[in-house]
Amino acid sequence: MRAANAVMCVLVCLFLDISVTAVLYVHGTEWDRFISDTMNFDISCSFLDVWALVALRFCVLFGAMIGVCLNTTLGPVRLKASQSCVSATCLAMVIYAIVKMLLYSETQNFPQDLWFWTLFTWTCVSSLAMCLLWHLLSCVTVQPQLFAYSAAGIDEAKEHLLAADDQESDGAKNNVSSGATIGRLLVLSKPDAGLLAAAFFFLLVAVIGETFIPFFVGKVIDGMVIQKKTSNFSGVIFVMALIGIVSASSAGARGGLFTLSFARLNVRIRGLLFKSLLQQDIAFFDCNHTGDITSRLTSDTTVVSNMISQNLNVFSRNLIKCVGVCVFMFTLSWKLTVVTLLGFPVIMMVSKFYGKYYKGLSKQVQDALGQANNIAEETMSSMKTVRSFATEQIELNHYNEKLHNVYNLNKKEALAYTYYTWSSRFVAISVQVAILYYGGYLVVSGHITGGDLISFIIYELELGDSLESIGSVYTGLMQGVGAAEKVFEYMNHQPSVPNNGTLAPEKLTGEVTFRNVSFAYPTRPDTQILKNVSFTLRPGEVTALVGASGSGKSSCVQLMENFYNPQTGEILLDDRPVHEYDHQYLHSQVVLVGQEPVLFARSIRNNISYGLQECSLNLIVRASRMANAHGFITELKNGYNTESGEKGTQLSGGQKQRVAIARALVRHPRVLLLDEATSALDAESEYNVQQALFKVKQHCTILIVAHRLSTVEKAQKIIVLDKGAVAEQGTHEELMKKGNLYFKLVQHQILGLETGIEDDSTVLNHSHTTVYRCVPVNGHSSDSDKEL
């Protein structure tokens, strides 16, 4: 809004406020009331102080208006920053008007004084309008100034405006996201609607019973003190006891049903989150640490179910109880009820600010815990590496550092809770003192009985407890919402490589084609791994990928597995893009064995048949023989039923590779990808595996990423990659005759040169080595293994 429009609106409202209040104050014509009230002021029946509220509103708004007119750059920013203080001032004006109404109610003219009721209503309305006008001035659009400001001042103003806008937008987003998160949790609870309905029914019965008990307590006291007859209160006590039994039984049923309902919700959320995680692309796991993901799946889901279930139960109970208590309080004494409710908006305002602040802290705590869990998980899973480098103390220091961050955030939470408790308890004590003083006056004046006052005090204490519980529940709900937002963030994440293909032909030849493929990893989008790569893998052939470390060999393999999408170009399987194939079908036909295969904490038999619905022991043994794994497996105590340990830690590196190769061969794939799959094998084991693979090639396409010349030179085609591009391709003999990059790589290894092949920096990164076995003898490898 433009400054002129906002100023005009404020001026009109100020003139209207002064005029209406003045007319109502003088009852239309009695202008000498100003003088009489000044000379003989009585707080219970004089309204000069109400007129003073007009002067206060005028000074506040007029000062704000002048500030905006003089400085439309920083003025609105400062008004927006002080919005909370103005809201508190407006609330104080309304509370004072209510107190004034209670004092005036003791006079004889109170019930029939239409002028007072109109003035009281106008004072409350104009006080609330003050907040709206202040907000209107804070939204004034920045305009060129009439005064000269330095460039630094203008920049500072822009920074303040941007910060204020960001804070306001973040607050709006938080409110929207909190409502949406709670709504989604309710949708997820829909299957348990019957249990929740029964829980709310028992909750209603329990709360109604609890609400009646203080009322009967007052009746019993009146019967004892005033009438002093047992017959007057024995029946009331019997009814009260019966209601208490029914209420207690309903409360137990309520708690059990709520606990059961949200235990089911916890299971449902965990299942949906785990399902969503399994559908994510590989890039998602590259960007997110395992510890963070585990924290979401375990800690955050537990926080969601516990906080939401416990706090929703308590919130519903106390909210219904507040309504019932207020009804009984109004029937006992509407004046004391008004005094009690004066503290309600103050507590709500404090709870609002505290809950908003605590929600932000809760998110930070969850993030810090996720980082700590990530360090712990990474350390525990790599304990051999940690022990071999004697870095236990370093890892402990890292973990303690993250825990210290969590502790600092917990200190902020504790400090915020302390301030919240102080403010809320101070308001509660002030209200209780006012009730005792004013209630005693009403008893003495004969407006209520002593029993009614005691009942009212009990109700007031219960209302205070309920309001305090609602305030703490709001904090707990915000903590649960903060955790739920993180869970839903993972559940809502859409994979960049969706597994939504449908192609599943009955026959697949296994021809793979790279057509002008360029690729960069999502975590490193500025680093081009592959550059316009094109080649073809044909069925019945063994193709080898050769190149220095970082040339893109493993990236080609991962693209064939449809782990990532290329930036340009396409990968075809039988002339169809790989992403068009059904996920289950594609990975039953295209199988990968990596250099460091991962085995699960299951038996060797279950690891080999992993993912297969039906796989006989004969097929497993046959695949194990081809992978040269049957011998060492049968030597184990439990044979194929031997447990592999977590990630296969009970087996050596070579044994894990052979089990992984058997796991691939048992599927009879049409495309077999071996990425350094025999790097940990000894010469004899590698030779046996090679012989088996060359027999299998008649039925499938084989791609080998190898660093051993004995494997490479037997391939029907060798593709040499250099810095992400195809440098040359052909057979071993053809490439050696050309004398280019492949020839230089081989010569470099055979001769063991330490210096200068020309352009050696483009040929090989010396910090990474590749192993070739140079000369096969009688089908076996020689001992002249060199490192590339």
Image (cartoon, rainbow, N blue to C red):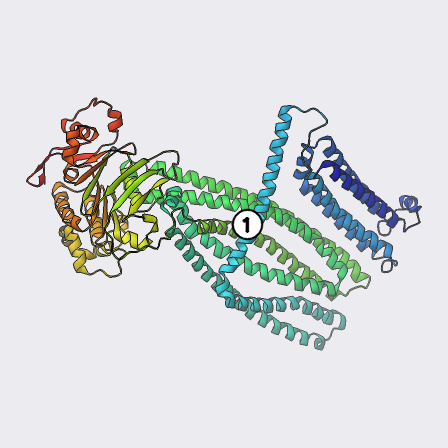
Image quarter where the C terminus lies is top left
Q: Position of residue 747 (x, y in %)?
A: 16, 28
| Circle 1 residues within 10 Å: few <14, some 14–19, many ≥20 | some
The residue most toward the front is: 575
- Whether residue 636 can be seen here: no
Image quadrant containing the N terminus: top right
Q: Taking 443 as reference, is 598 above or below it?
A: above
Camera sees residue 253: yes
The front one of 539 and 431 is: 539
Badge 1 amino acid:
Ser
* Residue that label 1 marks: 177
Residue 128 in the image: state x and y as whole percent.
Answer: 74, 48
SS at badge 1: helix
On the image, which quarter does residue 522 sit in? top left
Q: Nearer the viewer, residue 208 or 748?
A: 748
Query: Which residue does the image show at 80% across and 54% down from the upper left?
Result: 101
Front residue (pair 681, 439):
681
Q: Is residue 484 left or right of residue 43?
A: left
